[in-house]
């Protein structure tokens, strides 16, 4: 169980995850200040779609590999 936690923390520190978490933090702050521009929303949407799209592909690959 300890190894799983360490592995997940290591995965969280990947560049892709850090960029996504940083953009989410910036989005939250901009939303509180009501300063979200259309350009930022476009970039944020693309990054989030890419991040979760790769997660879905990874999960599907794991399921298909085990089947």
Image (cartoon, helix red, strand yellow):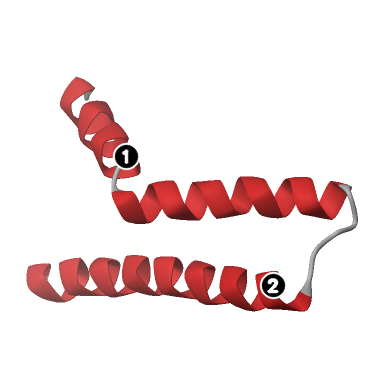
Q: Nearer the viewer, residue 19 or 57?
A: 19
Q: Quadrant of the C terminus?
A: bottom left
SS for tag 1? loop
Residue in view at x 42 percent, y 73 percent: 50
Q: Is residue 22 above or below residue 63?
A: above
Depth check: 52 or 2 in front?
52
Task: Provide the secondary structure element on which disc 2 rests.
Answer: helix
Q: Which residue matches tag 2?
A: 41
Q: Residues within 10 Å of mark 1 (few under 14, many from 20)?
A: few
Image location (x, y in percent) of residue 21: 51, 47
Which residue is located at x 28 percent, y 38 percent?
A: 8
Query: Is residue 8 left or right of 3 when viewed as pictured?
Result: right
- Give left or right: position of 37 versus 57: right
**Callouts 1 and 2 close, C-beta under 8 Å:** no
Q: Is residue 36 above or below residue 23?
A: below
Image coordinates of residue 9 in percent, x first then y, are: 30, 33
What numbered label is drawn on residue 40? none
Disc assigned to residue 13: 1
Residue 35 picture quarter: bottom right
Quadrant into which the N terminus falls: top left
Vertical arrangement, residue 5 with respect to residue 45, above or below: above
Q: Position of residue 47 (x, y in %)?
A: 49, 69
The residue at 70%/55% (across/down) is: 27
C-alpha span from label 1 to label 2 = 24 Å
Q: Position of residue 38 (x, y in %)?
A: 76, 77
50 or 60, nearer to the observer: 50
Residue farthest toward the top in the current orientation of the protein: 2
Sequence-first tag of 1 and 2 = 1
Q: How many numbered marks appear?
A: 2
Seen at 17% across and 66% down, the residue is 62
Q: Is residue 44 left or right of residue 66?
A: right
What crowding class fits label 2: few (fewer than 14 Cα within 10 Å), some (14-19), or many (20 or more)?
Answer: few
């Amino acid at each position: 169980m300890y190894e799983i936690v360490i592995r997940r923390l290591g995965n969280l520190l990947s560049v892709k995850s850090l960029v996504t978490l940083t953009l989410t933090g910036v989005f939250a702050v901009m939303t509180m200040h009501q300063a979200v521009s259309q350009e930022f929303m476009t970039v944020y949407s693309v990054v989030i779609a890419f991040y979760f799209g790769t997660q879905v592909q990874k999960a599907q690959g794991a399921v298909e590999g085990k089947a």
